Every structure is written in structure tokens, then in C-alpha cells.
Image (spheres, rainbow, N blue to C red):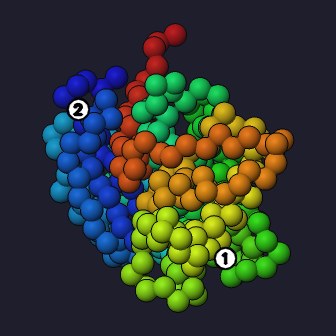
Amino acid sequence: MPSGAETAIGVDVGGTRIRVARISPAGKLLERVIEPVRQDREGFADQLLRLVDGLRTDSGTAVGIGIPGRVDGNSGEIRSAGYLDIAGMDIAGLIAHRTGLPSRIENDATMALIAEGWARPEGALGLIFMITVGTGIGGAALEDGAPWYGGGFSGQFGHVVVAKDGPVCNCGRTGCVETFSSGTALGRLIAETGLPVETRAEDLFLHAGSGDRSASTVLDRWAAPLQRAIESLVAVADPRLVIIGGGLGSEMTRALGRLPRRSKWFEMPVEAALLGDDAGVIGAGLCAFKAVRDAQPGPAA
């Protein structure tokens, strides 16, 4: 086990920003850097190595990296990464080669869910889902504290189909909830309604509370598709809890709370994430410590 003096580096890669931080074994965020993420392959690799090198200390033990998109939980292979051109890159190998530190790569929502399970008094017992709402929509599942990958790519909750048509999704289909309930979709809804482009989600709640029908309509149109997606997830898997996180997690949780309950059959055990934007980078650091434990030889037979 790592000692209290040791730290890990957590990396949370988003569609627009990259967060890198030193994390203690207790999940405390000690130091962090946030930058706009480079979306080209060479630029991203250079940026990642520079940021990790900048935060690395003599007590550093490992690096954990959360990536958006489709990451094979069993192998760490990046099949797609949303708006980033890094599919197929061996990022974990690159980090290990340059730093000599063990590294672990996961989907970014898995990293955030690891941190959220760690932060809750009841822990991560049972089946827990997380839906992250940001530039896109991600997801992850934990069962009794361990990531559940299915065949390798489970948790692609942003690609639950909720309509027969709609904008074309990055996956190539139409009707995915990501195209209706992401931050990108919210910006489109605001523009379509004729509201100022600088309107934020908190502005919408303020105006809706004052009786502004346009603001209420935007919020309801934004949240209703995700409500349908969550109902489907609950009907199939009956999770103990669904955590809504990401950059717009608290706003989406609030918007979902405005909607009428549609069925008595399927409870919606929805809670907002506790750690906000820090969940991904904290979870990546905690996951890095696990990489250290996994790399240690077991007891002799």
C-alpha cells in the first residue's frame, strides 16, 4: 500500500479541457493544473507529457488517465474519444515509457464514479451508475466498488436511443440521448429558442422561476430525453443509485427534478455528484494507486 507521503497523478481529459492533479492516497487534491485540451494527436501527447512532468514529484507512484469516449476497460484500448483525435493511441504505454511509472487508463466517467463511490458514506456497495453531462454524455457502472465493463465497453449511456430521429451522433446513429441532453445540445436549444448565446443553465433556472416560458421550455426539452434514458436503464438493470455528474451534472439533476414522474413502476434513484468537476481527476488518482497495488508481486506460495 502507498504510504501517506506518496502521491499519484490523476488526469481527467474532457472534450474541451484537461485537468491534471496530484492526489493523496486519501483522495485529497493537492495541486492541479487546468488547460484547454489539444485535440490533435501530436499536440495532445506533448501536452499530456508536459503536464504530468510538471506535477511529478519524487513521491509520485503512478498515473491514472480518464479518457472520454469508448475505452476498453479490459485492455485500455481507446476505440474512440469523442471530439479528440486520439483513437488507437497507447497513452498508458507512452506515460509509462516517459516516466517509468505504472499507469492505468479508463473511461473518464469510470474515473469519476470511482471517486464518487469513495466519497459517499455508504460507499459503492451494490450496482451504481453514473451519467456525466458535459460536452457530450458519458457513463459508467460500478458493482460493489469495482468497475463493470461488460464485454469491455459498457456504460455508453450517451448512446441510449430516445427518439426515432434527431441530430446525427458521433456514433453514426440518430436519436442518441447525447444529441439531446449534453452541454452541446443545451447550447443548440438556447440558440434555437432565440435566447442570447451567452445564456447559461443557471440563467435559465432564474428566468424560469420568474415565469419565463422560453427558459422553462429549454430546460424541459433538455432534461426530458435524459429522463427517458434513465427510465430505460432502471427498467433493465435496477441500479441502487444513478449519479449525475460532469460539468453540468448539478444543473441536469435540477432540471430532471422539474419534470413530472412518468411511471409508478420505475423509481428514479437520482442524485447529483458530490465532487463536481474534481471527481474525474480524483478518481484517476485513486485508480493510479490501484495500479501500484496491482503491479506489486503477491505473496510467495
Q: Which mark is residue 6?
A: 2
**Residue 169: image tag:** 1
**Mark 2 crowdedness (10 Å alpha carbons): few <14, some 14-19, many ≥20:** some
Horizontal side, residue 50 vs residue 42: left or right: left
Residue shown at the point (57%, 79%) measured from the top left: 214
Query: Residue 140 placed where, x, y %?
Result: 60, 48
Q: Position of residue 32 (x, y in %)?
A: 23, 53
Q: State how far apart marks 1 and 2 are (Cα).
A: 42 Å
Residue toward you, 23 or 211: 211
Q: Residue at x 58, y 63 (%)?
A: 137
Q: Is residue 146 above or below residue 206?
A: above
Numbered disc 1: secondary structure:
loop
Q: Residue at the top extreme?
A: 301
Q: Quadrant of residue 291?
A: top left
Amino acid found under the numbered disc labelled 1: Cys
| Snapshot quadrant of residue 22 | top left
Mark 2 residue type: Glu
